[in-house]
Image (spheres, rainbow, N blue to C red):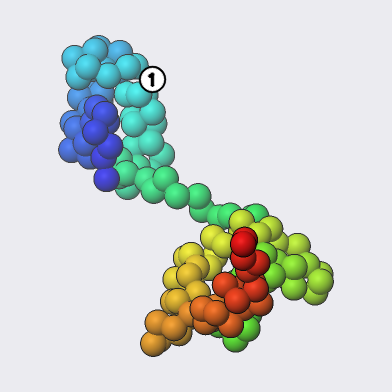
Amino acid sequence: MLHRNAPLSVEGRHRLVQRCKTRPIAHVAAEMGISRQCASKWVNRYRRFGEAGLADRPSAPRRQPTATPAEVVVRIERLRRERKWSARRIALELAAEGTAVSVRTVGRHLAHLGLNRRRFLDPTGRTTAHPAGSSPAGPATWSTWT
C-alpha cells in the first residue's frame, strides 16, 4: 500500500531496476525524479531479494516485547464480566496478585474488548448502578432551607 507521497509504485521500482542495469544509478534517479539514495536502496533490495525486494513492506512491528501477556488480558476480561469492576479496581486486583498493570492499560484493553461501558456488560442494557433514589445521598437526605 503506497502512501500518497511515495515516488515509486512497485511497477516504477521494477522500471528503475531495469534501467539501472545498463546506466548509472544517479542518472536514472535524476530522470525519475527521486534521490540517488532512494534509487540505490531499491536496486540493492532487488539484488539481495530479487522481485520480492521490490514489494511494499508492512510498517507494523514484527514483535512487541512490552505487550500485555494474553493471560493478563483474559484475566481482565473475566474480572470485568464476572464482577463488573472498573478499570481502577481491576488494576488494583491485578497488582495485589503480583501483576503490575496501569489503569490506562486496563482501560485500553476493556475498550478493545468492547467492555469499556458498564451497559455493554448486560445484554438487556441495564446498568449495574444503583436505581435512582436508593442511594444514601439522594433527595431524601438533602437538607431543606427554610
Report the side of 38 relative to 128 (left or right).
Answer: left
Q: Residue at x 21, y 36 (%)?
A: 9
Q: Position of residue 21 (x, y in %)?
A: 25, 25
Q: Nearer the viewer, residue 140 or 117?
A: 140
Residue 56 position (above or below residue 17): below
Q: Nearer the viewer, residue 46 or 130?
A: 130
**The residue positioned farthest toward the front in the image shown:** 146
Q: Quadrant of residue 145?
A: bottom right
Q: Position of residue 94 (x, y in %)?
A: 74, 71
Q: Which residue is mark 1?
A: 37
Q: Residue at x 68, y 58 (%)?
A: 102
Q: Which quarter shows the C terminus?
A: bottom right
Q: Residues within 10 Å of mark 1 (few under 14, many from 20)?
A: few
Q: Which quarter shows the N terminus?
A: top left
Q: Quadrant of residue 138?
A: bottom right
Q: Is residue 114 visible in this depiction of the protein?
A: yes
Report the side of 49 relative to 75 (left or right).
Answer: left
Label 1's element? helix
